[in-house]
Amino acid sequence: DPEKDLEIPASAELDGVAYPVSAVADRAFEGRSIESVGIPSSVQSIGQGAFSGCSSLSAVSLSEGLKSIGAQAFEGTAIEDAWIPSTVSSIGARAFADCAQLSRIVAHSEPWVDDTALAGCAGVSVYCPANEAGEYPWNMGLVANGNHLLPYGVSLPSEPIELEVGQEADLFEGGSGEEAEGTELSYAYAAASVSVDEGVVKAKAEGAADVAVALSLDGEVLSRASRSVKVVAAAAEAD
């Protein structure tokens, strides 16, 4: 049903000329009986109250290219989770306020977020990129609301690890691995010279390998990093 499952077009035609759709206008779909909406990468901004009061709206797909989510954009909707693209730089006042079904927001960026963006929400887990300062833009509100901030991220130093055959080392030494609840770390490496188990690298044979680390949530990669490992022959024991 096109009335319930809305797909914003990437372009629109006027007088025979195609123009990209770069914004969802203020109050464009306010109060409509929409159940899902897909927003293409051409859209850079979602206007104030664009979907406010769409009480049946439970699924929203936001694309890379989006830069701003306006005030009250999804206020009072039934959305259950929201994945914020890495291109988003601002989220306005009450953007997700009073969303009773909202349980999770996954942010791929560190945008400016108005303090009231989650007003009236309870039990929301907000995943956001970890930073050394430990300062985050999301206001979780009162502890009694049960909202949780879950920083995530993987970082590895640029210096390679050098091991002798049979030695082990912590892949994350000098870096960090922030595994938020529900996330999963995976490792990929092509060479047979090493093996990796729970972040520990074991040198098996002479050679070199690039170990790639990915942190995922529900199968979507949130953060990735890699580090080189060089394995040399074990030093001969002195007589």
Image (tube, rainbow, N blue to C red):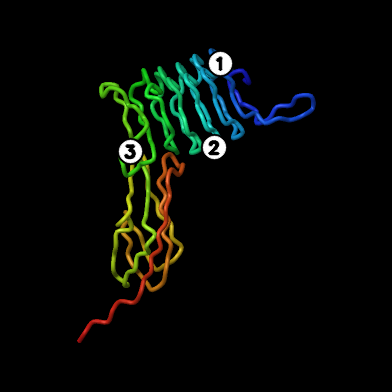
Q: Which quadrant holds residue 111?
A: top left
> In the rendered image, which quarter contains the N terminus?
top right
State whether residue 2 is above or below residue 108. Answer: above
Q: Earlier in the sequence, mark 1 or mark 2?
A: 1
Determine the residue positioned at 63% across, 21% down: 2
CA gap between label 3 and label 1 equals 36 Å
Determine the residue positioned at 27% across, 82% down: 236
Could you say where residue 15 lies in the image, as x and y percent from the top left? Answer: 79, 24
Kindly identify the amino acid type of the residue bearing the numbered disc 3.
Glu
Please tell me whether mark 1 sits on a helix, a strand or a loop: loop
Residue nearer the viewer, 53 or 130 = 130
Q: Which residue is mark 2?
A: 64
Residue nearer the viewer, 47 or 102 = 47
Could you say where residue 97 lies in the image, as x and y percent from the top left? Answer: 41, 19
Q: Which residue is mark 3?
A: 181
Q: Residues within 10 Å of mark 1 (few under 14, many from 20)?
A: some
Determine the residue positioned at 59% across, 35% down: 41
Q: Residues within 10 Å of mark 2 (few under 14, many from 20)?
A: some
CA gap between label 1 and label 2 equals 22 Å
Which disc number belongs to residue 27? 1
65 left or right, relative to 153: right
Determine the residue positioned at 40% across, 46% down: 215
Kindly identify the amino acid type of the residue bearing the numbered disc 1.
Arg
CA gap between label 2 and label 3 equals 24 Å
Mark 1 touches mark 2? (CB < 8 Å): no
State whether residue 195 is above or below residue 99. Answer: below
Please tell me whether mark 2 sits on a helix, a strand or a loop: loop
